[in-house]
Amino acid sequence: MADQESEQEIDKKTPDAPEAVETAELPVENDALKIELEALKAERDELKDQLLRKAADFDNYRKRMVKEKDEARQFANSALLEDLCLVLDDFERAIRSSEGARDYDSFHSGIVMIEGQFASMLERKYSLKRLESLGKPFSPEHHEAIAMDPAQEGKEIVVVEEYQKGYQLHDRVLRTAKVKVGHAENEATKEGE
């Protein structure tokens, strides 16, 4: 029995060789894992910081775009309005000059001149053109017929009167012309009468 107890004590005191190797390697492995864990934590913190910075940059960009969009909408027509101020100045001068003289003919010619300058400026600077309608064939893309002469069979429908001008911006109709339509008198019809 003493032999058995001494064997057990020896077993307790002298560990097996493989177990001794594992315990000897554990501190080295632990240190390597700790170093790797610290590196991963540092990388995580750096990526988290980058993410937060990118989110803040994006939020600032979004706010800046909203502000610029609002300003663009608010001041989009500033060039046009500046040009319209010149037209208003011309009208004021025409009114002032007519107050003293009370000359209808000069007032009328001044208004006609202002209207011509205004139409020319809109066409030149903004590509806004008047649609010429009178005597032209009726086109639903360019005209809105609000009145019609009695129909005559076999004749082409044309614009015979213009109530409101139509306008085209670049190649798109901005406003159709309000017109009265009728039938064209062609040369063969006039000669046969």
Image (cartoon, rainbow, N blue to C red):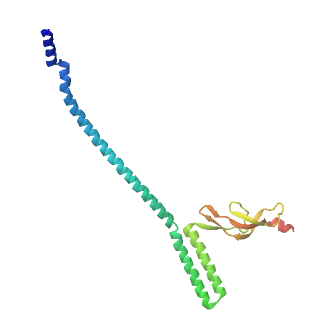
Quick one: which residue is furthest to the front in this view?
A: 1
Residue found 86% across the figure and 67% down from its top:
192
Where 114 falls versus 101 (above or below)? above
Picture quadrant of residue 40: top left
Residue 120, position as x, y percentages in the image: 59, 72
Residue 134, position as x, y percentages in the image: 72, 69
Can the viewer see residue 14 in this picture? no
Q: Toward the viewer: 192 or 88?
A: 88
Question: Is 57 situated left or right of 90 in this image?
Answer: left
Residue 144, position as x, y percentages in the image: 71, 64
Q: Toward the viewer: 171 or 164?
A: 164
Question: Is 112 situated left or right of 52 in this image?
Answer: right
Q: Toward the viewer: 74 or 42?
A: 42
Residue found 62% across the figure and 76% down from its top:
115
Question: Is 6 situated left or right of 72 in this image?
Answer: left
Residue 122, position as x, y percentages in the image: 58, 70
Residue found 43% across the figure and 58% down from its top:
63
Where 90 falls versus 44 (above or below)? below
Question: Is 65 situated left or right of 86 in this image?
Answer: left
Picture quadrant of residue 109: bottom right
